[in-house]
Image (spheres, grey):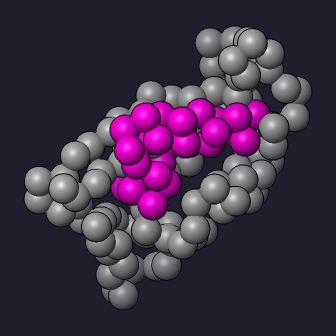
Amino acid sequence: MNRPIMPPTIRAPFASYSHGIEVAAGARFVFASGQLGVAPDDTVPEDVEAQAVLCFENIRAILADADMTFADVARFNAYVTDRAYFPVYGAVRSRFVAGSGFASTLVIVSGFARPEFKIEVEATAAKAP
């Protein structure tokens, strides 16, 4: 099991995540590439919330293929093209992931490979044997 690290000597996180995560020795790792809000048929919803849901559904499929779940995620890295998308991303993440047992970073970027993309999410998961 991954152990959240929350030193009381530093400011609490801005949302539901941990400042650090300790992964148990011997754990298996999965590194999910950045997932974009694109459906299997290559359609991209205009709505950022719908794109975020697709990102997390894609990550869930990757984790399932490795016999893991969101409970095994040690870190999320997210990228959005507008500061206004931060609360939308956080709300969608909270629908898929409970608690704060993961580290997290959110970065505002100028764009992605295709102009219709508004969000990209990467995940690193670790599961003890």
Left or right of 27? Residue 120 is right
Most foreground residue, 55 or 40: 40
Is the C terminus in the top left, top right, bottom left or bottom right quadrant? bottom left
Tell me what residue is drawn at x 45 percent, y 41 percent: 63
Magenta span dominant secondary structure: helix
Tell me what residue is drawn at x 73 percent, y 12 percent: 42
Tell me what residue is drawn at x 87 percent, y 34 percent: 47
Left or right of 10? Residue 58 is right
Residue 107 in sight in this render: no
Tell me what residue is drawn at x 43 percent, y 68 percent: 101
In the displayed image of the protein, which residue is found farthest to the right? 46
State which quadrant residue 7 falls in: bottom left
Measured as percent of width and height from the top left, residue 102 is found at 43, 62
In the displayed image of the protein, which residue is found farthest to the bottom? 8
Left or right of 39? Residue 69 is left
Measured as percent of width and height from the top left, residue 34 is found at 51, 29
Most foreground residue, 58 or 117: 58
Residue 9 in sight in this render: yes
As displayed, is residue 127 above or below residue 111? below
Residues in magenta?
Answer: 51-78
Measured as percent of width and height from the top left, residue 105 is found at 49, 51
State which quadrant residue 115 falls in: top right
Measured as percent of width and height from the top left, residue 11 is found at 46, 79
Is the N terminus in the top left, top right, bottom left or bottom right quadrant? bottom left
Say whether residue 69 is magenta: yes
Left or right of 124? Residue 89 is right
